[in-house]
Amino acid sequence: MFESKYSKVLTVILVIVIVAILGLLGFLGYDWYQKYFLENDALAFVENYTEDTEDENNTADENATDNTTATNPIDSIEKTNTVSGSSQNEVPTYKGFNVVGTIEIPATNVNYPILEKVSKSSLETSVAMLYGAGINQVGNTVIIGHNYRNGLFFSNNKRLNNGDKIYVTDNAKNRLTYTIYNKFETTPEDASFYSRDTDGKPEITLSTCNDDSSRRLIIFARAE
């Protein structure tokens, strides 16, 4: 009798362990699937979006071998508050969201469209513009993204350092190179740095959570 009950207990424990393992494998599998397809979809969009810009850079300098080092057209950017970068062209969309530009960060393998609106669903799709003058416009523009701690979106911003480059293209096909010059953590409520003097240049602020979501990791970058 005792051995029978003991055997049943072991069977129940074994079943629970197997179910737990299958659940964990399923979760990890879904996480990998989501990350893989989100990143590939975003990369395909960014490559298509920046194709015209790269062609223009190649025409301007036939000897250029690295398009990410193209001269920044800061002087030609209008000092306006438009978020699309162009009022003449149709606003591009990504998965149903209006796009105001793209962001590329080689140091963390980031390639994403920048969505116009911040919402729960948009931030589950890509990064988004929260505040500011507009993509590649004079002044500071805040771009936010989730930290899922799996490499998606701004999960690896903690690995960025002063001097790292960020490439931002807007809807008018202006492609600017930004250099990181400040990195710090602050409270989730702190927005004191959103509106700041940029000395007449475009700047961006990247905002995401730290790994335990208790604070915000903030990165300042200035157009060269």
Image (spheres, rainbow, N blue to C red):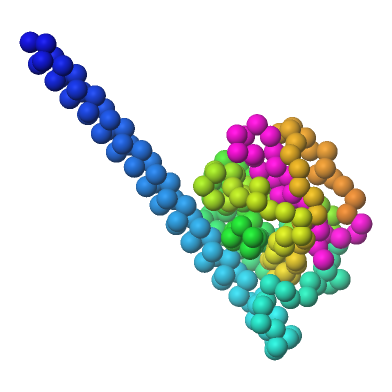
Residue 203 is a magenta residue: yes
Q: Quadrant of the C terminus?
A: bottom right
Q: Is residue 132 visible?
A: no
Q: How many marks?
A: 0
- Whether residue 194 sits left or right of residue 95 in the image: it is right
Q: Is residue 209 visible?
A: yes
Residue under the point 24% across and 24% down: 13
For residue 209, above or below residue 43: above
| Residue 90: x %, y % from top left | 64, 66
For residue 94, above or below residue 65: above
Residue under the point 79% across and 71% down: 72
Please tell me in which quadrant of the rendered image residue 24 appears: top left
Residue under the point 38% across and 41% down: 27
Residue extending farthest left: 1
| Residue 115: x %, y % from top left | 63, 54
Please tell me in which quadrant of the rendered image residue 85 appears: bottom right
| Residue 49: x %, y % from top left | 60, 69
| Residue 219: x %, y % from top left | 74, 49
Residue extending farthest top: 1
Q: Which residues are magenta?
A: 199-224
- Whether residue 134 sits left or right of residue 150 in the image: it is right
For residue 139, above or below residue 18: below
Please tell me in which quadrant of the rendered image residue 213 appears: top right
Residue extending farthest front: 3
- Whether residue 132 sits left or right of residue 153 in the image: it is right
Q: Quadrant of the N terminus?
A: top left
Residue under the point 70% across and 45% down: 207
- Magenta span: predominant SS is strand
- Whether residue 60 sits left or right of residue 127 in the image: it is right
